[in-house]
């Protein structure tokens, strides 16, 4: 299966973002990709909660989700919508950061709500409290596809290896890590974390990404790292999108998962231990 990883530079206006996302999905399909992946918050990047409240929709009426489901059906592709910011019926008004796997008939094959919230102090000026606007998910997800079982995660999840081990033990052969990774932590940690998750699990890791400075009508702008990556089960980087908007392609061979796990079968070597 050929995969096409999108790298986007979205703004805080979902309607303005949608045409380019659709165009790149179509370009990926025309390039031979049967599995196309978009990054985290494909519809809208914003740290302004009031603006998000005005711009976002519930899943049932979200225009981006509806359009991309229609595109998947029209193109006959598997589509990972890395995530969408969506309204929920939570009493505290927090949103969902939800990833969707769309089947070639346009149906939602699986959905996953990001579990780990990016609540960090990167520097004195780079402070994030994702949990203030988004409520965390609580369920890990593995989905069946013709090209292997897909374990779904989002961005900051990548720092929690127990999640990835659980997905691999549940049968995942491909791990998706759509991201809007911070430009400072990305330079330091992005590649090594993704390669580590691939090596530890013997899985392909596919990580479409947001890149650059993201235009905002309200609130401060945000800057993301880019470098959408595909990593093989043995840990080799298969593709790196650098810092340009566009599509990168990679071929997924399920046999590579079996070969890596046969060489180092660490998923079968867990041992009970005491302490600390």
Image (cartoon, rainbow, N blue to C red):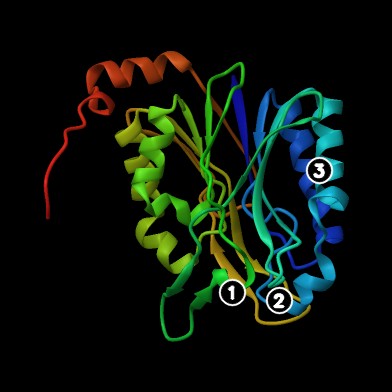
Q: The C terminus appears in which quarter of the rendering?
A: bottom left
Q: CA distance from mark 3 to mark 2?
A: 26 Å
Q: Which residue lies under the disc numbered 2?
A: 49
Disc with the residue nearer the chain's start (1 vs 3):
3
| Camera-side residue of 265 and 28 | 265
Q: Are marks 2 and 1 in contact (CB under 8 Å)?
A: yes
Q: Is residue 256 above or below residue 23?
A: above
Disc with the residue nearer the chain's start (2 vs 1):
2
Q: CA distance from mark 1 to mark 3?
A: 30 Å
Say which residue appears at 69% left-offset and 64% top-offset. 95
Say which residue appears at 80% left-offset and 63% top-offset. 56
| Camera-side residue of 93 and 8 | 93
The label nearer to you, 2 versus 1, is: 1
Residue 180's quadrant in the figure? bottom right
Q: Any mark on residue 132, and which?
A: 1
Q: Is residue 253 above or below residue 91?
A: above
Question: Which type of secondary structure does the marked residue at label 3 adopt?
Answer: helix
The number of numbered badges drawn on the structure is 3
Tell me if residue 232 can be seen: no
Question: Which type of secondary structure does the marked residue at label 1 adopt?
Answer: helix
Q: Are marks 1 and 3 in contact (CB under 8 Å)?
A: no
Disc with the residue nearer the chain's start (3 vs 2):
3
Say which residue appears at 80% left-offset and 46% top-offset. 65
Q: Any mark on residue 22, and which?
A: 3
């Amino acid at each position: 299966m050929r995969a096409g990883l999108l790298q986007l530079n979205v703004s805080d206006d979902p309607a303005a973002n949608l045409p380019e996302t659709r165009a790149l999905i179509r370009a990926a399909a025309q390039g031979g990709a049967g599995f196309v992946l978009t990054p985290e918050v494909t519809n809208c990047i914003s740290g302004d909660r009031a603006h998000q409240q005005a711009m976002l929709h519930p899943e049932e009426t979200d225009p981006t989700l509806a359009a991309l489901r229609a595109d998947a059906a029209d193109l006959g592709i598997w589509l990972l919508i890395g995530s969408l910011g969506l309204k929920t019926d939570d009493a505290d008004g927090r949103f969902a950061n939800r990833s969707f796997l769309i089947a070639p008939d346009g149906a939602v094959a699986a959905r996953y709500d990001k579990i780990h919230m990016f609540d960090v102090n990167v520097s004195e000026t780079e402070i994030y409290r994702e949990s203030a606007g988004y409520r965390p998910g609580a369920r890990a997800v593995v989905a069946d596809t013709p090209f292997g079982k897909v374990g779904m995660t989002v961005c900051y999840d990548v720092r929690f290896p127990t999640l990835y081990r659980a997905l691999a033990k549940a049968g995942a052969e491909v791990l998706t890590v759509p991201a809007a990774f911070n430009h400072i932590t990305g330079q330091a940690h992005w590649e090594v974390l993704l390669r580590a998750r691939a090596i530890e699990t013997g899985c392909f890791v596919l990580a479409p990404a947001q890149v650059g400075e993201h235009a905002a009508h309200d609130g401060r702008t945000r800057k993301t790292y880019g470098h959408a990556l595909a990593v093989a089960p043995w840990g080799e980087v298969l593709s790196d999108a650098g810092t340009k908007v566009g599509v990168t392609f990679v071929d997924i061979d399920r046999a590579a998962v079996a070969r890596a796990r046969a060489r180092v079968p660490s998923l079968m070597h867990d041992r009970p231990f005491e302490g600390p």
